[in-house]
Image (cartoon, rainbow, N blue to C red):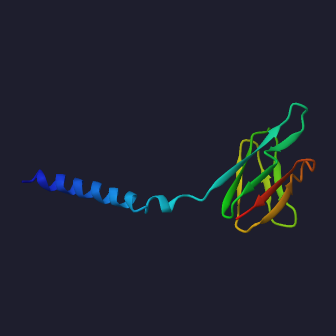
Amino acid sequence: MRRTIPIAVLIAAVLAFAVLFATGWASSHKSPPTATVKIVQLKNGNYAFKPADITIKPGTEVIWNNTSGTDHTVTVNNHAGIDDIPPSSKAHLTFAKAGTFKYHCSFHPYMKGKITIKK
């Protein structure tokens, strides 16, 4: 009789877990969507955001991954941005509202990008 209680508890736990997935509870608690922009060094020695232009939905977290060997910024024109992304580091911003945001690197002003948020 002692063995049937733990087995019954295990079966009940498995069934409860299955019900949560079947009802969509687990899938409704996902992380917000993300988009990644790499910061790279080009063959000519300049740096760039890759891709430079992205289109996302509201609530998307954009992650900048600095794969170059120097510091960069993400300065969103007329808005707050990211002051410093050291080499081999990542930084992120979440865009909640629809619109278009142009950005650049303050250290390397020729580096430019654009984020378009559409519903």
Residue appearing at x 52%, y 58% in the figure:
30
Residue 93: give x, y in percent of width and height: 72, 59
Q: Quadrant of the C terminus?
A: bottom right
Q: Please, which residue is most extreme toward the left here?
A: 1
Residue appearing at x 44%, y 59% in the figure:
26
Residue 106: give x, y in percent of width and height: 89, 54
Would residue 27 appear left or right of 21 to someone viewing this image?
right
Residue 13: give x, y in percent of width and height: 27, 57
Residue appearing at x 28%, y 57% in the figure:
15
Residue 116: give x, y in percent of width and height: 78, 59
Q: Quadrant of residue 117?
A: bottom right
Q: Please, which residue is most extreme toward the bottom here?
A: 97
Q: Is residue 68 above or below residue 1?
A: above
Would residue 28 appear left or right of 64 to someone viewing this image?
left
Depth order, front residue of 22/102:
22
Q: Quadrant of the N terminus?
A: bottom left
Residue appearing at x 88%, y 47% in the figure:
111
Q: Please, which residue is most extreme toward the right here?
A: 110
Q: Is residue 64 above or below residue 116?
A: above
Depth order, front residue of 88/111:
111
Number of callouts in the render?
Answer: 0
